[in-house]
Amino acid sequence: MRIGITCYPTYGGSGAVATELGLELARRGHQVHFITYDSPFRLRGYAERVFFHQVETRMGRYPLFDHFPYTLALASKQHEVVLRERLELLHVHYAIPHATTAYLAREMLNGEWPLRVITTLHGTDITLVGQESSFYGITKFSIEQSDAVTAVSTYLRDETYRAFGCGSCAIRVIPNFVNMQEYRPGEPGCRERLAPPGHRLITHVSNFREVKRVKDVVRVFARIQRAMPATLIMIGDGPERVDAENEARDLGVSADVRFLGRLDSVASLLQGSDLFILPSQTESFGLAALEAMACGAPVVATRAGGLPEVIDDGLNGILEPVGSVEAMGRRAVELLRDPERHAAIRAAAIEKAEQFSADRIVPMYEAFYSEVLA
Ligand code: GMT
């Protein structure tokens, strides 16, 4: 198949999933064209049958535009690439504004070429941003105008029906996936340079937005640190980073908390981790948790959104209510103090991650594409 993919190219779960999907599809013989404003961050170097088409984000000084109309430039580029490359499918990730630009690009074809548009809903496009009054109407319209819609969890599908109605769209749940060759348990000694000898290594990865509750990560860590020597590695960047840094200072743990900022590849850090903390307010799926589990790091997370579809409390991870740092901290300490139970949860986490391996999930997308094209 000849497939166009549009996503956010910078850090974020939807861009990560879209890019990994494109790469997997190309490995399976499909031709994949990424259409976005920058090369997606997980697109590393040359890959056979993968192409990148850059969308302009600015133009020569033109006094009328305070803000460059990226949405129009994207729709125009999608239309151009679809026609030139004879793309059968345009698969857009994150509804805002991608479902809208894909709708425009398909309308611009005016029957000249039979393009099908698939929108994958990822999370905050439905649970937060899409429900803001400035976006609600156009998001609902654009989802309904897609030829097919997928959601990354049952929770997100149901939330879309609840919040948007979308009566005419039968949303297919295709969960996120992980590349088990890249995200795999580490070799002994893989954590040597990550934390001082004798320290437990705790990690967190996110975009440090409010919804991630990064201060809770530090609060849970402070409870662990009271019980045993430990180091916390915070990976990512975003608006709440300064608050998290201040929290670490206020709780007196900043000497053992390392803020690394954004990193392209996190597998080696996850492989060395004893625990991964994800205390989000909501999480449509929790790709970061899945990647940690695949690397053998048990996850302490909140019982929110789609996280219970990834983590079974007590079996392959720990789930507690949003904001319950005391309970998360207590259960984290109990787990870290019990090597046998830690090993059992770690093994169960890897086993659960295998249910979401790329080899199992990507064929679901291929089958869905064939259905939509038929
Ligand atoms: O909102 C974010 O954290 C980023 C967002 C995205 O679309 O980039 O992540 C969402 O999509 C991921 C991939 O499908 C999911 O694993 C995340 O759970 C989801 N984030 C939220 O729902 C908060």
Image (spheres, rainbow, N blue to C red):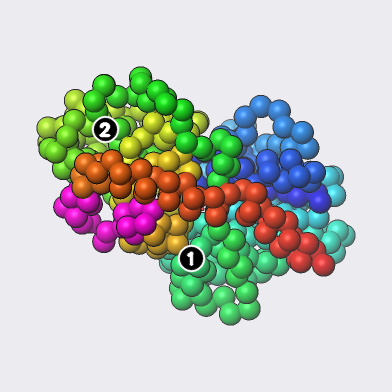
Q: Residue at x 58, y 49 (%)?
A: 357
Tell me the amino acid under the disc marked 1.
Leu
| Image side of residue 139 versus residue 359, left or right | left
Dot 1 beta carbon under 8 Å from ligand 1? yes
Q: Residue at x 80, y 49 (%)?
A: 2
Vertical order, 242 against 78 (above or below) = above
Mark 2 or mark 1: which comes first in sequence?
A: 1
Q: Nearer the viewer, mark 2 or mark 1?
A: 2
Residue 70 visible to the viewer: no
Residue 295 visible to the viewer: yes
Vertical order, 342 against 105 (above or below) = above
Considering depth in this image, is 262 or 188 the residue closer to the camera?
188
Q: Secondary structure at mark 1?
A: helix
Residue 167 is situated, as x and y percent measured from the top left of the image, at 58, 80
| Image side of residue 292 versus residue 369, left or right | left
Residue closest to the far front: 340
Q: Magenta part of the protein: which range?
A: 313-332
Image mark for residue 200: 2
* Residue holding disc 1: 156
Considering depth in this image, is 4 or 320 the residue closer to the camera?
320
